[in-house]
Image (cartoon, rainbow, N blue to C red):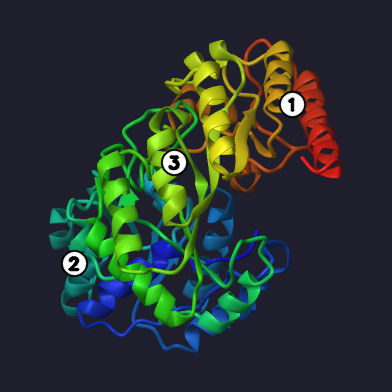
Amino acid sequence: MTPLIPLGPAYIAASLKEAGFDVKIVDLTFIDKRALNINEVKKAILRQDPDVVGLSALTWTISTAYEIANALKEEEPDLPIVAGGPHVSALPERTLKECSAIDAVIIGEGEYVFRDFLNILLTKGICKEMAELKGLMFRHRDRILGNPYPVYIENLDSLPFPARTLFNLEKYMEFSRKFQAKRVPVASMVTSRGCPHRCIFCARISSGYRYRARSPENVIRELKQLKNYGFNEVQIVDDNFTEDRKRVFEICRLIKEQGVDMSFDLPNGIRVDHVDEELLSKMYDAGFYSIHLGVESGDDYVLRTIRKGITVKQIKSAVNIAKRIGFDIILYIIIGLPGSSVEAERRTLDLINDLDVPFTFSVCTPYPGSPLWEMVKDKLKGVSWDRFDETNYGNFIYVPDGMTKEQLQECIDRANEFKLQARNVGC
């Protein structure tokens, strides 16, 4: 996967710049986590002479964030350190308890919360007044205070575009030239946040279940900015891009009307029950050429169990329509979902074989913040955070009821073999 600018930190940085703060980025995107030198990262951060350090982490990288925070505190005991991201939003108090070097955590969308926190911090220091800020928990003397209710921004048009120029644009553009894209270089963007569907495996703490969308006009302005930067293709990484079909139609109309000469990919997965021939045809005509469909399973019982809200029949219909129009299609599946079985996994591979389209898969992982996490978290005590990785095919942490660990491993191996065979025959 070609590295793309991390949009979460880029949005936070843009919001802080707009509020008058001097923001600098130490970007670890191109560093292999396994080869990460914490001491070098610490030096790179401290060379910026920061008044405050913000760290962003996923579940499988939170341990590294802890190491960085501890190293910074050891060198600069009075340096305030703030953490955010999906893992932190799901487990704010636990994050503070697990890492004493972290002074505060942001819960939910941090563009405004972080700004308000800094306005207090840089004038009064960490104080009880911060407890009035929603979406913030912090350490005050020997107590943890704050409001853990996440903040979600309603008017996304009010946000400045991500501060991409704080990152090494040339390096990202060069790396993206290696991507299997229709046109290069490739950028990413978000046009909406949140998803109202409640799939059992999905963590939605950072962006929420309430769907909120940027206006089509606002989207077009950012596309034009990306074009001016030199990007020719955009990956739209929304949680649910096609939730509002009227908005998608309008975005497509404006792309054509205003001559936005770019191609578009939807790599985050769209729902098969939200597309039809009319919508997909308009999208294709506007430059959308590649779609990933989040099908998860080819077994109706599993789809019901995970509360996906789709059927195998709908999967077949969406794929056939998209193929007929001319889209490049990739199916997303998840092996080892609740309700699954050896037979269900076999039916999934049979469906993929019948549809004759490429697929990629992950292993079901109960990420903090998901309904599945709440169901099984007691069984996962003692499991290190770096094992919470859905691409770890040989060291998974969850096995659904009715399957053994050995059976699940066999299903993973079979999917891997099937994927390799399909690639060799040009599927």
Return the disc, 3 or 2, that comes first in the chain's sequence: 2
Disc 3 marks which residue?
A: 280
Q: Which amino acid type is marked by label 3?
A: Leu
Who's the residue at 64% across and 73% down the image?
A: 175
Q: Which amino acid type is marked by label 1?
A: Asn
Who's the residue at 35% across and 61% down the image?
A: 256
For the question of whether residue 162 can be seen, the reply is no
Return the disc, 3 or 1, that comes first in the chain's sequence: 3
The disc placed on residue 324 is none
| Mark 3 → mark 1, Cα distance in angstroms | 23 Å
For the question of whether residue 33 can be seen, the reply is yes
Q: Secondary structure at mark 3?
A: helix
The disc placed on residue 116 is 2
Query: Where's the C terminus, which quadrant?
Result: top right
Who's the residue at 72% across and 62% down the image?
A: 34
Disc 1 marks which residue?
A: 353
Who's the residue at 53% across and 45% down the image?
A: 291
| Mark 3 → mark 2, Cα distance in angstroms | 42 Å
